[in-house]
Amino acid sequence: MTVPTLRPADLPAPASAAHGAPRLPALGALALAELRRMLRNPMFAVGTIGFPVMFFALFGLGVVNETTDQGLKLGALILVNFGAYSLLSLAMFSFGSAVALERTGGWLRLLRASPMPTALYFGGKLLAALGFSALSLGVLYTFAHVAGGVTIPVGTALLLLVKLLLGLIPLTLLGLCIGFLVSPTAAQITANIVSVLMSFASGLFTPLDQMPPFVQTLAPYLPAYHLGAIARGTVAGQTGGEVGHWLALAAFAVVFGALAAWGLRRDEAREQ
């Protein structure tokens, strides 16, 4: 009897080869899949694109040509405030409630059983969030320009876009904290509460000088406050105190990142 001889090509790839597989195509595929998931969810698109546009129509269109005591037009300031709110909502729902659902749905468990590094999964989600954020900000700016005549010089608009997307990072880490530290059943309502309350307390909906004193005291301890201040300073040409706001956002990123990593390890330990 002849015993068949297996050739190397017939054998499964060793684990080391799987770990060494090209990661860039996998990262692109993950980001594209996440982006499709966002676009195919009507409620997600309404919350992150439709609500900021609706809020600008309700609260911004009537005063776009009014000016502040410093002679700055309110239209651009209100526009960037709702742009920051859009990013905050996206971070809470894409990285908060969505990650919590993926925990219960078994998607994260399946990914852990695969040779794909966990960092690649989060990298794909972050790339998709940056792409969707650019889309959301573009729609909001187009509406403000067409309906309200709000215009920001091209160079300033591009610089503003880069700063807002960079400032999205600590917000996404806050979303991951919700996704890993809050129970899946409570993640959706927690994301809603955090996005709405933080927007009010950070002065994105109402100027802080019109808010109660305790809210004005609380605001500097919220990441959305610093992102809003950077955005308003950019369109106003007042970037003198921007370094302090960036340092505050970096500190928030470190704290939220450490908490999210601890939550991830705790979630992994439960399944072992």
Image: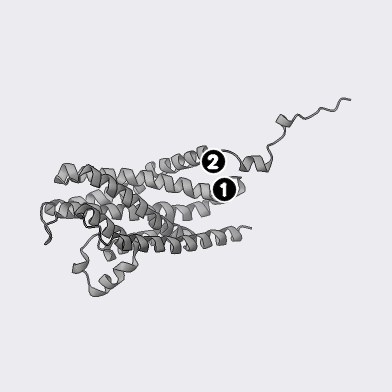
Question: Can you tell which mark lies on residue 23?
Answer: 2
Q: Residues within 10 Å of mark 2 (few under 14, many from 20)?
A: few
Q: In this view, does 217 lie to the left or right of 76?
A: right
Residue at far front of view: 240
Amino acid on which the number 2 mark rests in the picture:
Arg
Residue at image x 36%, y 64%? Answer: 248
Residue 81 visible at all: no
Q: Is residue 136 left or right of residue 180?
A: left
Q: How far apart are marks 2 and 1 (CA)?
A: 9 Å
Amino acid on which the number 1 mark rests in the picture:
Pro
Q: In which quarter of the image is the C terminus?
A: bottom right
Question: Can you tell which mark lies on residue 78?
Answer: none
Total marks drawn? Answer: 2
Judged from the image, the secondary structure of the residue bearing numbered disc 1 is: loop
Instruction: Name the quadrant containing residue 173.
Output: bottom left
Judged from the image, the secondary structure of the residue bearing numbered disc 2 is: helix
Q: Is residue 124 left or right of residue 215?
A: right
- Measuring from the top left, give residue 62's x and y in whole percent: 12, 53
Q: Earlier in the sequence, mark 2 or mark 1?
A: 2
Residue at far bottom of view: 214
Residue at image x 46%, y 60%? Answer: 257
Residue 16 visible at all: yes
Q: Name the residue under label 1.
A: 117
- Measuring from the top left, give residue 255's x and y in whole percent: 44, 64
Q: Give yes or no for contact between labels 2 and 1 (Cβ–Cβ under 8 Å).
A: yes
Q: In this view, does 37 lie to the left or right of 241?
A: right
Residue at image x 28%, y 66%? Answer: 201
Q: Is residue 261 above or below residue 138?
A: below
Color scheme of the displayed model: one colour
Query: Quick one: 79 or 188, which is closer to the camera?
Result: 79
Instruction: Name the quadrant containing residue 18.
Output: top right
Residue at far top of view: 2
